[in-house]
Amino acid sequence: MSSSQLEQTSTERSRERNHIEPPLQVPLSNLSKNQAQQTTLEHIHPSIPSYAQGTPEVAFPFFVVKLKAAAGMGESLWDAANQCAGGVAACLWALNQLNTALSAVGCQGRIPNVCYSLAIDNNLGQLYVSWKAEEEDGLTVYVQRVASYLLSDTEHFVRLYACVASILKWGATTRLQHIRVAADYIGGRGGGGD
């Protein structure tokens, strides 16, 4: 391999390490049961300027997964964890916008501002929970590692699988229902659409 090819490969790896992948996303059509919810969510979603959106019909992701090769690729689990942190921050900002819209129409309730992420390589998986909290100086995003899994250990692998399945179930049921109720409330109070 020539020195120019090595430099190009090194530059590509550096670019990839600093790239933040868009989070796992849920189509807006899956969020809404009816046209009123759809209209409300479409109105709220574009007003989130810092939200990393993969496609126009996607909103309110809740789980970011980043995979890295363990050896010889210039990548690390640390890189994956940092990229997960950037992805969940975008997820939390999107959900914060929905909570802001709820407040604007007089709702006292809030959707829990929580997201999950998984940084994984050939050997380990690290599961994180992230949340956004109001502080005196504004909103702060917190990221906490909740578990580490040795993927070569069957018991660890099964526990990781169970955790990921539980997170996906939560996102497709409880969290989804909260978003639908919020959209109905906002739409019913004149906060969506027009």
Image (cartoon, grey):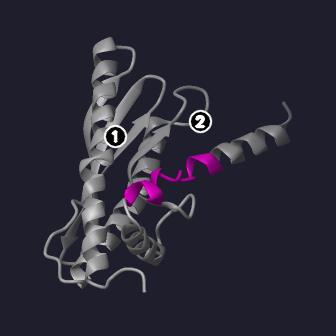
Question: What stretch of residues is rendered in magenta?
Answer: 15-32
Q: Is residue 186 above or below residue 54?
A: below
User: Which amino acid lies under the numbered mark 1 shown in the image of this protein?
Assistant: Leu
Q: Earlier in the sequence, mark 2 or mark 1?
A: 2
Q: Is residue 88 above or below residue 42?
A: above
C-alpha distance separating marks 2 and 1: 31 Å
Mark 1 surroundings within 10 Å by alpha-carbon count, few (fewer than 14), some (14 through 19), many (20 or more): some
Q: State whether residue 66 appears in this view.
A: yes
Q: State the residue in front, 19 or 159.
A: 159
| 70 to the left or right of 189 | right
Residue 32: horizontal and vertical position, in percent?
A: 38, 61
Residue 125: horizontal and vertical position, in percent?
A: 38, 30
Image quadrant in which you'd find residue 73: top right
Q: Which residue is mark 2?
A: 74
Q: Which residue is mark 1?
A: 168
Q: Is residue 80 above or below residue 32?
A: above
Report how many numbered discs are placed on residues in the image. Answer: 2
Quadrant (top left/top right/bottom left/bottom right) for the C terminus: bottom left
Quadrant (top left/top right/bottom left/bottom right) for the N terminus: top right
In magenta stretch: residue 117: no
In magenta stretch: residue 29: yes
Task: Give the residue displayed 18% in from the left and 83% down from the top.
Answer: 106
User: Which amino acid lies under the numbered mark 2 shown in the image of this protein?
Assistant: Gly
Q: Is residue 174 above or below residue 183?
A: above
Task: Give the residue displayed 32% in from the left and 71% down from the top.
Answer: 98
Residue 52: horizontal and vertical position, in percent?
A: 50, 63
Task: Give the residue displayed 25% in from the left and 64% down from the top.
Answer: 181
